[in-house]
DNA sequence: TTAGCATTTTAGCCTTGGCTAAATTCTCGG
DNA sequence: CCGAGAATTTAGCCAAGGCTAAAATGCTAA
């Protein structure tokens, strides 16, 4: 590998960034829903063991995205909140765009989760542009 | 984790399947371009070391996707060719769809690579449906 | 209050996909 | 034909994200 490939180095971190985004998004969701996010809730939602969640949370804390005391609930730091907000926005844009194409709710949810980490801001803007947004909420 | 979560087990393999798809796609491309795919070419294209490629190729061979003799070029098995074809198709559909939205060539290439592994067949069909295909090739 | 269940943490294992260093094999020009 | 440089392979390291088993802690109902 020559110096030219420094730009590719980021690719390696892509997966861990996705994990971080998924987790902060879910933590925010849980905090909104139930006031706090517990490790066990995360394990259930992601379908992995609590041990796996524990290790990922250790990394997120190391990266200053979450904050928590031993045996206590998990909360987002400001940095974590910022990431969660951006993530949720992207997710929502992708989801609504897919829905507007006619993708079913269930599949749109699944695909949006997969796609959201891989759309550039250019593409995202175009997704938004081509999503007819209803001015009314459903009754 | 209860029995209920067996269905989630597949998610864990998602990343390795993506890698496999990227590699068979690239190998097919190289074979088309130059008659054979060499380990070094793959390393250059993916921006990783030859050692990394070597390990990934060992796995792909274990999974019967590629076939090669030591120190020799790499070729796809029938199974590998099938996967490469499907991958390329999906890639092309996503790419053309993004282009039709107005995404620039460069970004469409990057985003298509990220997105292609995460679109269901339902979404893919709708991408196709909403891509106006030109009946003429460029002159 | 405390016993027992639930939750969290720790220890230790695995695979994937990164890396460097070094050994091996191939290939081509002289 | 052979030696040097290129390509490939092997050995050994690391982090991430999976797992089970078991220990530590928290919490609640009797």
Image (cartoon, coloured by chain):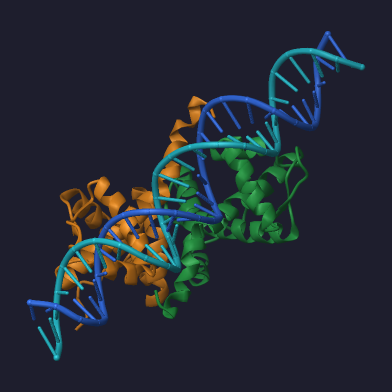
Chain colours: A orange, B green, C blue, D cyan
Relative vertical location of residue B7 with respect to residue B138 in this rendering, above or below: below
Is A84 on the left-hand or right-hand side of B74? left
Is A41 on the left-hand or right-hand side of C26? left
Residue A96 lies, in percent from the top left, at 32, 68
Say which quadrant the C terminus of chain A sits in.
bottom left
In front here: A131 or D26?
D26
Residue B98 lies, in percent from the top left, at 46, 55
Q: Tell me the residue at 23%/50% (across/down).
A: A65
Relative vertical location of residue D22 with respect to residue C14 in this rendering, above or below: below
Is A48 on the left-hand or right-hand side of A58? right
In front here: B6 or A14?
B6
Q: Can you see residue A128?
A: no
Q: Can you see residue A13?
A: yes
Q: Tell me the residue at 61%/42% (across/down).
A: B53
Residue A58 lies, in percent from the top left, at 29, 52
Is D6 on the left-hand or right-hand side of A34? right
Q: Tell me the residue at 60%/58% (across/down).
A: B87
In front here: B59 or B95?
B59
Q: Tell me the residue at 35%/62% (across/down).
A: A51
Q: How many marks?
A: 0
Say which quadrant the N terminus of chain A sits in.
top right
Residue A81 lies, in percent from the top left, at 19, 54
Relative vertical location of residue A13 with respect to residue B64 in this rendering, above or below: above
């Amino acid at each position: 590998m020559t110096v030219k490939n420094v730009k590719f180095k980021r690719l390696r971190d892509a997966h861990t960034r996705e994990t971080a985004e998924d987790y902060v998004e879910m933590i925010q969701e849980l905090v909104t829903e139930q006031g706090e996010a517990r490790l066990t809730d995360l394990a259930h939602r992601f379908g992995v063991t609590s041990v796996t969640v524990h290790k990922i949370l250790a990394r997120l804390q190391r990266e200053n995205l979450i904050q928590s005391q031993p045996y206590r609930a998990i909360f987002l730091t400001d940095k974590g909140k910022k990431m969660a907000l951006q993530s949720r926005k992207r997710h929502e844009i992708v989801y609504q765009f897919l829905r507007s194409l006619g993708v079913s709710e269930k599949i749109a949810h699944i695909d949006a989760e997969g796609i959201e980490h891989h759309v550039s801001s250019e593409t995202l803007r175009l997704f938004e542009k081509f999503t007819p947004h209803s001015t009314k909420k459903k009754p």
